[in-house]
Amino acid sequence: MNRKERILQILKEKKEATVKELAKMFNVSEMTIYRDIRELENEGKVKRKHGSVMLQTSENKVLKTVNTCPICHKPITRAHPYKITVEDKIYETCCEHCGLLLHKKFEDKEVSAITYDFITENPITAFNAYFVVGSDAKPCCSPSVIPFSSKEDAQKFSKGFGGKVLDFFQAYEEIVQSMNKSLRKDCCGTTTIKLSSLKKE
Ligand SMILES: [Zn+2]
Ligand SMILES: [Zn+2]
């Protein structure tokens, strides 16, 4: 049984546990547990509430209508998906990876965007967040993009799981370019991107 399966087992028995407790039980860092939890959360198996982790039961699943990601069409299972607001309309994506790609659609529009800190799950303005891009953590789409409100936490995370610590604008360029590359592989090599409304203040 791998660690994720054992976490599910524990939650079945105990009903809920904190990240701290789980880290102690498995003798691993809290970052490692956060990574497992985020993956389980995206698989729709657990949810987080008031600092505890618990199993996602079919009852509390029904309460939320399931939207699908406008970029990759996966069902959105996270409690706090990435959100972009454009002209009073809110768009949600399965994860930060697709969120950044969705920004490309709105690059000439006035947008705001909310992401949620990987550790605290507190909302952060995406433009102020730090992102670990391309780490071993694959909670959803690849290359993965994991948001942090503090640069130190992002660096700590990338020390353990690899990936680059980038600000919003850098992460946006990285993801858009990596997707262009994988879509057009050997074609010409350069792609131009218009980023007019995403300039940093
Ligand atoms: Zn998606
Ligand atoms: Zn995703």
Image: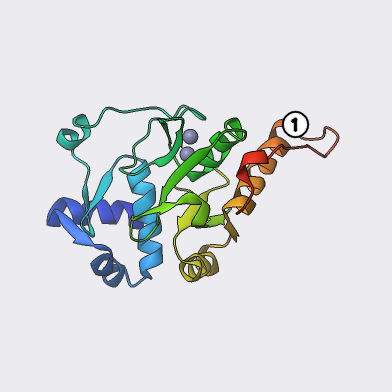
In the rendering, at what x and y percent does residue 45 appear?
28, 43
In the rendering, at what x and y percent does residue 158 appear?
54, 65
User: Height in image: 42 above or below 76?
Assistant: below
Residue shown at 47% from the left, 42% from the top: 112
Q: In the rendered image, which residue does mark 1 sit on?
A: 184
User: Height in image: 149 above or below 143?
Assistant: below
Q: Is residue 131 left or right of residue 196?
A: left
In the rendering, at what x and y percent does residue 29 appear?
38, 70
Residue 144 visible, this orientation: yes
Q: Nearer the viewer, residue 162 or 145?
A: 145
Residue shown at 35% from the left, 40% from the top: 43
Amino acid marked by disc 1? Arg
Q: Is residue 186 left or right of residue 72?
A: right
Q: Nearer the viewer, residue 91 or 176?
A: 91
Q: Quadrant of residue 82?
A: top left
Q: Quadrant of the C terminus?
A: bottom right
